[in-house]
Amino acid sequence: MFGKNKSKAWRQLESVYKHFRKTEMKDLFAQDKLRGERYSEQLDTMLVDYSKNRFDDNVLKALFELARERGLKEKIDDMFSGKKINATENRAVLHIALRNRGNTPIYVDGRDVMPKINATLEKMKDFSEAVRLGRFTGYTGKKLTNIVNIGIGGSDLGPFMACEALRYYWAKDIKCWFISNIDGTGCAEVLNKIDPETTLFIVASKTFTTIETLTNARTCRKWLVDALGEHAVAKHFIALSTNKEEVEKFGINPDNMFEFWDFVGGRYSMWSAIGMIIAIAVGYKNFERMLEGAYAMDRHFAETELEHNIPVILALIGIWYNNFYGIHRHCVVPYDQYLQYLPAYLQQLDMESNGKSVTLDNKYVDYATGPVLFGGAGTNVQHSFFQLLHQGTEVVPIDLIVPAISHNEIGSHQQILLANVLAQGEALMRGKTEAETAEELEAAGKPQTEINRMKKFKSFSGNRPSTTIVLKKIDPYGLGMLVAMYEHKIYSQGVIWNINSFDQFGVELGKKLALKILPELQGTAHNVEHDSSTSNLISYINKIRK
Ligand code: F6P
């Protein structure tokens, strides 16, 4: 398809690239006064301006041709109709069913999945409300106000990111805590601050076999039992999982289990029972609004022609950079403190989904797939890695995400923030030539020698791409739209690269090796064969820990 066996659309893009690659965005803006408007799409209260990217109509046409050639529209339909598009695991991929507010039937193996999804949502609603209203209390009758999510990866990052994003909506008396990492620090730091009588532990694990989560959960269980006795467990522990057997083995009553299914990938699961802590923190109605926002994006993705389809456009622009410009990086900068964990969340979503090297036809790819994704909250990161974005040798396409209205409109804070985000996009695109810099220095009264010495250091090459995403507010609905937009972008890219975005075999090898090394650190195995570096590190660590 690509690489050695290039398709027609691919070859066409290569030839378009040859002619286009030196084109400067500032010239495109000068030629087309309506470029900003023409290359913006709006969905409800979200505006996506992708005009500050390196393309013209010709490039776009060739990119949409590639999407057609790859059968993207049909592949979107396949996802929404419950086809087993996770081919390597023979599973349907139905995070979209979790927020299917239209409740239209979606069949997997001839059975509609909606009734069980609706039943779990109903159970989540009852439980989250019971906790919030103090109807479901702890063992000693006290209200549960410390809610601790124990999970890792998709069973942590989604709920954590969303809880932080929606912190403004938290019930005043509820505090959310997250324990994910395996070192004792996460557990210790949380357990030191909470009271067993008012604590609800949510053990979140799709498989219920993840060593970090189960180890942390056991430690928390012991802490609770030591304080309140074995009988208290039923009132202080619930499980979110697809694995009833393991939940029971762990000692959590199946009545306290909230189910989801193998058609929900871990990193796509915050819309499922995995979102329980979100529902408790912000209330079920707000959780539902988040589902509605995602549903709006789902409908847009499923129904809008490719040329105006936001996730598809973003996916194609990413492909353009990745496979033609050879830019294998992507940066996400949300300009809102509430969204500070979005980049970490998207790292898993994107890199675990599209960090693949084998095609669905069981061949090694000979083209680049998923980019390295990083980011952080603006304006903070303007004062850290933006130097490289503006003047470094690497070109890094960036998503700038900002709410027009802040939940905390204090003085002119929000206007300053908005001015900054807009300025960054403009500066990255326009840059500043040496001549402009020289002029500026001259106007500032600098002597010619100083101007000559400084003009290179102070100029900016420009032509650096950005996409600006404006939300009305960081509210549950907007968050739902935003996250679903990235999910669908990632799927669209996976389709074009012909990879399975929904497995993650790449995380297995290290997990298995850790189990081999563990007994060596516990002193129950010796002289296990490793490379000399690993053996040396093991003996150094064992020595220092004695
Ligand atoms: O190790 C990666 C992974 O399998 C992720 O895909 C998943 O989100 C995470 O671990 C946690 O898995 P589980 O929810 O089964 O505990």
Image (spheres, grey):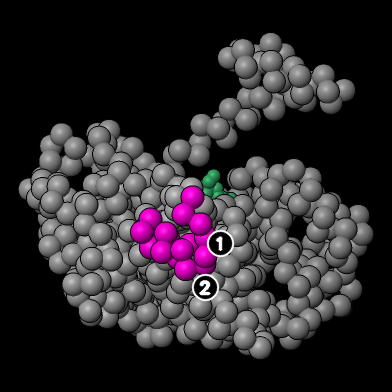
* Magenta region: 432-449
Q: Which residue does the image show at 44% across and 50% down from the upper left?
A: 452
- Magenta stretch: dominant SS? helix
- Is the residue under label 2 in contact with that under label 1 (CB below 8 Å)? yes
Residue depicted at 52% across the width and 60% down the height = 446
Disc 1 marks which amino acid? Gln
Q: Is mark 2 within 8 Å of ligand 1?
A: no
Task: Residue lying at the far right in this picture: please name it.
Answer: 227
Q: Which mark is residue 420?
A: 2
Q: Is residue 343 visible?
A: no
Per the rendering, the mark at residue 382 is 1
Residue type marked 2: Asn
Q: Nearer the viewer, residue 506 or 400?
A: 400
Percent position of residue 369, x then y: 32, 44
Is residue 445 rendered magenta in the image? yes
Residue 102 position by quadrant: bottom left
Circle number at residue 153: none
Q: Residue 76 at what x, y percent from top left?
A: 25, 64
Distance from mark 1 CB to nearest ligand 1 atom below 8 Å: no
- Please name the residue shown 56% across and 66% down the image: 378
Q: SS at mark 1?
A: helix
Instruction: Please tell me which residue is depicted at 84% across the width and 26% down the height of the picture.
Output: 545
Residue 182 in the image: above or below residue 199: above
Count of labels shown? Answer: 2
Q: Quadrant of residue 40?
A: bottom left
